Image (cartoon, rainbow, N blue to C red):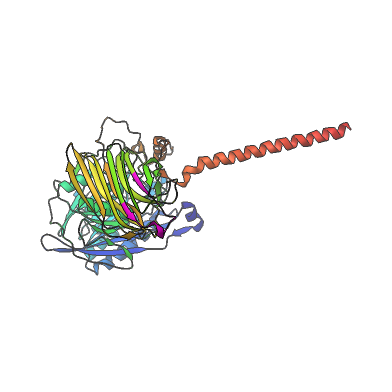
């Protein structure tokens, strides 16, 4: 909802939705651990940060106690789950923050009576200690004059054992500072080692690559995801990343108002994913990994990004990429094929479907290769390539991938992509069903001569309700320390009152005329122009009428 609605309501509280999911994970040493995750829409009390955070912390404490009765050993809460996404501008953001002790200090906030320890930290620490489980939260951290979006991990003794500051401020809801370093962060438990991620981390190469190279196979992931259709819906992207990296992801999403926002994703195993359902719990056995030393993990890594941009949001609404920039062909027959090249990617499609079941449904083959990012990163220069079949609302291709009922059954699909393999890239199958679930498919890769790679994706069984089905590849440019960055967010001080360095302004100046993300705001200039024309026409009519009246008066006077 928009902040204006909150103002009208005084105290704005979303209907509380808390989705519980627990999974039993089996380690290589035959040990089990129960992981719990929550989808949660926080309470928000307008202009009252203290009460907002206290109310949400109370909910955390209650749910920690609840899952402890199910023998859960670790629980993950969403990004911005303590504050909500309704954060103020920079000058007032400090009121929503708290200081977080360095994990190296081995502090248990529950045991600290000092006023320097925030009440929320103390209470959650006590809940973790009392119920003997690990707790992962996200909050606004204050250090000197800087404000960070940070994940904080409490051990089963209530000790702060890990702190991870957000580095990529993509689709952000607050005017946070960027962490001075990107730190690959992990923490140890008696039942395994967990990497720490947040927000848009899975859209980037680091810090996940470093954590994976060190042997981390389990990740905790608070997230407030902004879906960009058709290839980056929250559930869809998390599942694809978990499968591509062959890891377990405990995803705790900020509730976005639709089902299947997250859950526990189990990599390539047949047992999963375990999706959150309101009021229901699910458990299963999965092969995990043994503990590893984290002494060599928590280190600064280089983020290979050419630009560090900031995109700020006001809500968790869906966005769409404008696919008119892609090469495309409408699927016109039940048996259709198409082969097309774009840049260094070549896509070949073979489809068998029954379009007589829904003659008005529009499906297209799409091919793309370039620097526009299909995940909605409007001003970030990462490259992507796509070979996909997508359902569109109209031939304008502005709102492709919108989930809705489709009666067209696809019997067989085969997509083949051939491209130049790069050192830094992420490849995955991206599928979306109109029931918000994945579409079963198999994908295999074959190395070809001359540094090329061939990937083939095949539909597993006949499927109605297809929304998106394809191979998506993201390749990362190497970091250029001499590149000029327009991101001045680190110039923010708590006393800042001018808006010259607003990240929103930075980002909009970076946009080109071929902006991919479509939103209602993109039509504002046309609406304003239309209104101006109407007003001008009305003025001309009024002037003409006035002249006619004056002329009649003059004639009458002369007579």
Counting from the top left corner in percent of width and height, residue 482 is at: 27, 29
Asked if one can make out residue 361 in the rendered structure from this viewpoint, the answer is yes
Instruction: Find out whether residue 352 is within the magenta segment.
Output: yes
Look at 43% across and 39% down and name the residue there: 497
Counting from the top left corner in percent of width and height, residue 264 is at: 25, 59
Quadrant (top left, top right, bottom left, bottom right) of the C terminus: top right
554 to the left or right of 467: right
Look at 43% across and 51% down and name the residue there: 393
Front one among 404 and 15: 404
Quadrant (top left, top right, bottom left, bottom right) of the N terminus: bottom left
Instruction: Find out whether residue 555 is within the magenta segment.
Output: no
Q: How many marks?
A: 0
529 to the left or right of 500: right
Look at 18% across and 64% down and name the residue there: 285
Query: Splitting the image into 4 quarters, where does residue 61 fall?
Result: bottom left
Asked if one can make out residue 130 in the rendered structure from this viewpoint, the answer is no
Magenta highlight range: 351-366
């Amino acid at each position: 909802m928009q902040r204006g609605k909150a103002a009208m309501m005084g105290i704005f509280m979303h209907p509380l939705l808390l989705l519980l999911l627990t999974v039993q994970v089996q380690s290589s040493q035959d040990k089990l651990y129960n992981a719990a995750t929550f989808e949660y829409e926080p309470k928000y009390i307008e202009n009252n940060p203290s009460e907002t955070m206290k109310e949400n912390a109370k909910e955390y404490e209650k749910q920690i106690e609840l899952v402890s009765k199910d023998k859960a050993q670790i629980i993950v809460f969403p990004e911005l789950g303590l504050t909500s996404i309704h954060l103020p501008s920079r000058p007032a953001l400090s009121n929503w923050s708290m200081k977080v002790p360095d994990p190296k200090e081995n502090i248990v906030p529950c045991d600290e009576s000092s006023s320097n320890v925030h009440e929320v930290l103390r209470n959650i620490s006590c809940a973790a200690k009392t119920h003997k489980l690990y707790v992962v939260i996200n909050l606004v951290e204050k250090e000197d004059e800087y404000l960070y979006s940070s994940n904080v991990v409490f051990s089963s003794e209530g000790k702060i054992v890990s702190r991870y500051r957000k580095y990529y401020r993509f689709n952000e809801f607050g005017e946070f500072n960027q962490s001075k370093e990107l730190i690959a962060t992990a923490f140890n438990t008696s039942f395994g080692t967990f990497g720490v991620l947040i927000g848009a981390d899975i859209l980037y190469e680091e810090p996940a690559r470093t954590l994976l190279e060190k042997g981390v196979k389990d990740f905790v992931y608070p997230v407030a995801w902004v879906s960009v259709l058709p290839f980056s819906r929250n559930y869809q992207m998390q599942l694809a990343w978990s499968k591509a990296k062959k890891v377990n992801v405990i995803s705790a999403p900020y509730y976005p108002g639709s089902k299947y926002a997250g859950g526990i994703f189990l990599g390539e195993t047949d047992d999963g994913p375990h999706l959150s359902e309101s009021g229901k719990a699910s458990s299963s056995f999965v092969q995990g990994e043994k503990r590893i030393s984290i002494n060599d993990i928590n280190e600064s890594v280089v983020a290979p990004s050419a630009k560090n941009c900031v995109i700020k949001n006001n809500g968790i609404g869906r966005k769409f990429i404008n696919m008119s920039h892609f090469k495309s062909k409408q699927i016109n027959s039940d048996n259709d094929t198409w082969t097309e090249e774009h840049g260094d990617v070549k896509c070949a499609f073979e489809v068998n479907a029954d379009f007589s079941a829904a003659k008005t449904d529009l499906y297209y083959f799409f091919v793309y290769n370039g620097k526009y990012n299909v995940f909605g990163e409007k001003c970030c220069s990462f490259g992507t390539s796509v070979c996909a079949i997508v359902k569109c609302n109209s031939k304008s291709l502005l709102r492709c991938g919108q989930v809705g009922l489709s009666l067209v059954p696809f019997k067989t699909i085969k997509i083949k992509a051939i491209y130049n393999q790069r050192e830094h890239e992420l490849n995955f199958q991206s599928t979306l069903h109109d029931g918000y679930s994945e579409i079963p498919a198999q994908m295999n890769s074959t190395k070809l001569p001359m540094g090329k790679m061939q990937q083939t994706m095949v539909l597993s069984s006949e499927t109605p309700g297809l929304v998106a089905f394809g191979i998506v590849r993201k390749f990362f440019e190497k970091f250029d320390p001499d590149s000029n960055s327009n991101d001045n967010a680190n110039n923010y001080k708590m006393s800042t009152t001018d808006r010259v360095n607003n990240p929103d302004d930075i980002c909009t100046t970076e946009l080109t005329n071929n902006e991919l993300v479509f939103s209602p705001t993109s039509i504002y200039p046309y609406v304003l122009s239309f209104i101006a024309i109407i007003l001008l026409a009305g003025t001309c009519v009024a002037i003409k009428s006035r002249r006619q009246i004056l002329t009649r008066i003059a004639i009458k006077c002369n007579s």
